[in-house]
Amino acid sequence: MAKTILVVDDSASLRQVVSIALKGGGYDVVEACDGKDALSKLTGQKIHLIISDVNMPNMDGIAFVKAVKQLPNYKFTPIIMLTTESQEDKKMEGQAAGAKAWVVKPFKPEQMLAAVAKLVLP
Amino acid sequence: MKSESGNSIRAATGISIAAAAVILWSSLGPVNLAAAVVLVVAAYVLDGWVAARSAANVEAAQAAAATTHSAEIATLKAGHQACLASLGQDIAPAWLRNIDAARQQLEGAVVHLTQDFSGIVDRLNEAVTTSYRVAGVDGNGSSDGMQQVVSNSERRLMMVGQILDTTLSEKEHMLAESQKLVTFTVELQKMAADVASIADQTNLLALNAAIEAARAGEAGRGFAVVADEVRTLSTRSGAIGKNISQKIDAVNRSIKESSELIESAATRDAQARIDCETQLSGVVQDFQRAMAGLNESSNVLRTEGAAIKSAVAGALEQLQFQDRISQLLMHVADSVSQLQQQLSAGGLPDANSVGRLVDRLERSYTMAEERPRGTVASQAAVDSDITFF
């Protein structure tokens, strides 16, 4: 059974690019346009990994990661931050919030798949 | 300043006049000199009056010019403020609208492009999968693949050859049996000849018996009847033997004809078997050539498909620049919006307010390429940067 990955980004085109890359690797994809939308998508289905942008309206990526880590069912779900931010202090902020990896856009699809394969829950 | 300048000129004029008087004293004499002095003094006084009058005029002109200048500055300032207000009310919103429209259009176009690329990859995968399924070389044990069809066809065609071989073998066996029959008929012919010979000898014996019965007279009458019957039987036996011989000859001819027919058929069958094998081999080779072509086509499709997928993956990577460009535009739009708010609040933007705008813009930067060149190491934006925690 295919693993399901939640992709959170306010850019529709970026969500689509990530989805295509992940579907090419055999994963199912659920999309959300910001942190709040993503939290609503976590109920009612099993998510094996989350890929989230950082700068988003309504609820940004760091706040979303912190919120996810408060959820009992998703406390250990790996989260990859996918962002244009490349500053070390931002990365440390993501790490402190609970993210497992930090990917700077633009990403190479095969590298993203390798990162997902390394982190996705069994 | 102007008055001091006028006094200096007059002092210089006085010194010049005194110098001239000394020179004239030596050349004109005291009377003429006195007249000249009077004239010079008069000129000097007149010059002072003119200078004083000029200074007053200059000061008045300067005051008027200052008033005009202040009015002009006020007009310019009002125009400048009106221009800035227009910038805030008219141009800045237009910039923001255009930036937003650019972002929306760019996003929409990239979404469509991405969908198209995704469709290309999906259709390509389907084409490659179908091609390999049809060729039957996908390594999944597919039974309806062309490879399997060719293999099955070859096996069935070989079975046709085996059936022909069996038929040919049976005909050869039939021919051999027919040739055995010829041997039997030779023996039968000999037996028929023996029967005929026995009949002749019996006939001769019956004739002798009839002669001896005639010699015996009345006593041999009964024996004469027997001898006559034996003679009749021997004659019939001879006729039957002859008939058998004729029948055997007829059978022998039939067997010979049948053997010839069977032999001829066997020869044709053997040739047909060779022709059939040649044709079947040709058909199998045609199939195998077609199969090889199909396999090559499938391999080319797979290779080209992989290349296209790689190119599409590269395109998907490049399309992510839309997100970066969108963020750049958003930061510019935010800054324009802040400038608009400042201008709407009234007053001219000063160095502090401009500095605050620059500071807020720089704090909104997320990408290295947003910062002025030289302030940070230029990041290779095309390299994926992945950090695991």
Image: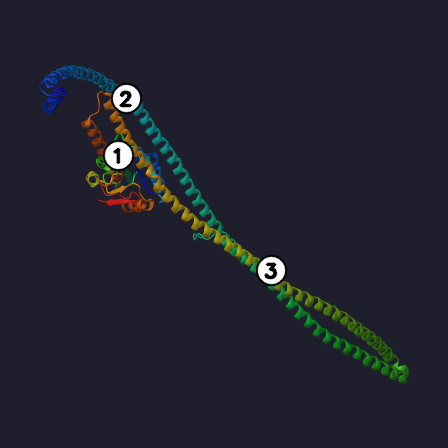
Image marks 1 and 3: residues in contact by CB distance under 8 Å: no
Above or below, B360 relative to B261: above
Query: Which quarter of the figure is the N terminus of chain B placed in?
Result: top left
Residue at 22%, 34% in the rendered image = B362
Question: Which subunit holds the residue at mark 3?
Answer: B
Q: Residues within 10 Å of mark 1 (few under 14, many from 20)?
A: many
Question: Which subunit holds the residue at mark 1?
Answer: A
Helix or strand or loop: what does disc 1 sit on?
loop
Left or right: B357, with B1 as reference point: right
- Of residues A121 and B329, the one nearer the viewer is B329
Task: Kindly report which numbered mark, 2 or 1, lies closer to the viewer in this rendering.
Answer: 2
Q: Amino acid at mark 1?
A: Asn
Left or right: B80, with B311 as reference point: left
Residue on which the image places disc 1: A55
Residue on which the image places disc 2: B83
Image marks 2 and 3: residues in contact by CB distance under 8 Å: no
Residue on which the image places disc 3: B279
Numbered-mark total: 3
Helix or strand or loop: what does disc 2 sit on?
helix
Distance from the alpha carbon under mark 1 to that under mark 3: 73 Å
Q: Amino acid at mark 3?
A: Gln
Distance from the alpha carbon under mark 2 to that under mark 3: 95 Å
Q: Amino acid at mark 2?
A: Cys
Above or below, B233 relative to B28: below
Task: Kindly report which numbered mark, 2 or 3, lies closer to the viewer in this rendering.
Answer: 2
Query: Which quarter of the figure is the C terminus of chain B placed in?
Result: top left
| Image position, residue B329 (x, y; %) | 30, 32
